[in-house]
Image: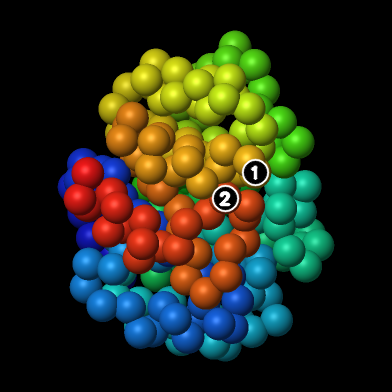
Amino acid sequence: MKKDIQQLLSRAPLVVGTVHSAGSLRAASRLKDGDVDVLEFRIDSLADRLDGAGRALKAAKFPVLLTVRHPAEGGANKLTAKRRKELYLEFLPYAAMIDVELRSLPAFSDIVAEAAKARCAIVVSNHDFAKTPPLATLLARRDRALAAGADVFKVACVASTAMDLARLLELTARTPKGYIAAMGMGRFGRVSRPALAEAGSVLNYGYLDQPNAPGQWEARELKRFVSGR
């Protein structure tokens, strides 16, 4: 489903339900209006059930965020760059947004160009499963992403301390409204999600059947919390 994506992003904070398993494919089909705002289809995780993923994408009741994640940033099934590109192009007609890692931008400039031509929003992401980098590093990565044409810079880091959470909050506060999606994982992951949504994170991720990142909320629970803020 494609909508005016900029109009959608202006309604932030948005809740993204992540579809990454057989169970979440089934759960996505049962969602009602207002349960989430966006569905992220993790095609790397669904690479062994592409027929089912394709049917679900075509039938999606919500705008689709298409992700084929790099193996070094949590991607499943050890997909090569060539295969990831093939999957992006196969499912791009059903997407309102795509997610490409900051590290992948040089090799995936053709995919980003095709997505832009299709009027998809571009989410440029960066994941750190060990720590929250220094603020200067996060700001530099954000600047690289936005300079490359990102509509949203997504950053997900392990937040083990209150200072890590404070760093993500400061990054969000120092980024123009609508251009940042920030989240913590690990010890401060759960508390980070609503706090960062309140601070200005435009895309806020939750699970539909089981978490695929430590600290995630169930998507409908997060949606209720964010909507009632």
How far apart are labels 2 and 1 at the CA level?
A: 6 Å
Question: In this rendering, would 132 be left or right of 93?
Answer: right
In this view, which residue lies farthest toward the top?
136
User: Which quadrant of the view contains residue 90?
Assistant: bottom right
Amino acid type, callout 2: Gly
- Whether tag 2 and tag 1 are in contact, CB under 8 A, the answer is yes
What residue sits 51% from the left and 46% below the top?
Answer: 190
Left or right of 210, for residue 224: left
Q: Quadrant of the N terminus?
A: bottom left
**Residue 171 visible (yes or no):** no
Q: Indicate the quadrant containing the C terminus: top left, top right, bottom left or bottom right.
A: top left
What is the number of the mark on residue 215?
Answer: 2
Residue 199 vertical position relative to residue 56 in the rendered view, above or below? above
- How packed mark 1 is, by other alpha carbons closer than 10 Å (few <14, some 14-19, many 20 or more), is many
For disc 1, the marked residue is 186
Q: Residues within 10 Å of mark 2 (few under 14, many from 20)?
A: many
Is residue 54 placed above or below 218 in the rendered structure?
A: below
